[in-house]
Image (spheres, rainbow, N blue to C red):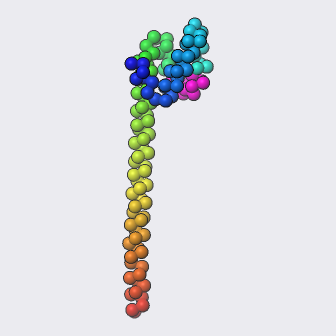
Amino acid sequence: MAAQACRTVRVRQACQALASYLREAPIVGDFGRVFREASFPPMDTLVIQTGLRTGDLASVLYELGEAHMRQAVTSAQALQDILADAVLLVVGLLVAAIVLGGYVPLFQAYGRLG
């Protein structure tokens, strides 16, 4: 279960840093250094410290990983929506250029006739 919790890169790095820190000094309770080195946001730090206090670190890390995965999926979906609109705009401009490119010679020909 703890391996599943370490799916995102940030959480995986934090798990490795936390494990090495606990191997070096298991009695010292200053985990702030570990979280700062792993570039954790303050809310994630608070969640992990709560998990350490309650003894339920595996499920806390799993939920934290799930939250980060949901955030990544939401960001990817937003980017996909923006890119779809941009591609639609580019294709529309391309079609408009082709249509105008076809009509300009016709208008020039009509101008020579009249």
The percent position of residue 102, horizontal first and vertical second, equals 39, 76
Left or right of 104 on screen, residue 29: right
Residue depicted at x 45% and y 11%:
55
The magenta-colored residue range is 35-44
> Does residue 112 show up magenta in the picture?
no
Residue depicted at x 43% and y 55%:
86
Query: Farthest residue in the top direction?
Result: 27
Residue depicted at x 42% and y 21%:
3
Residue depicted at x 43% and y 13%:
56
The percent position of residue 65, horizontal first and vertical second, equals 43, 26
Residue 75, quarter of the rendered image = top left
99 to 29, vertically: above or below: below
30 to 39, vertically: above or below: above
Q: Is residue 10 visible?
A: yes
The percent position of residue 84, horizontal first and vertical second, equals 39, 52
63 to 103, vertically: above or below: above
86 to 79, vertically: above or below: below
- Count of picture labels: 0
Query: Farthest residue in the bottom direction?
Result: 114
> Does residue 37 show up magenta in the picture?
yes
**Quadrant location, the C terminus:** bottom left
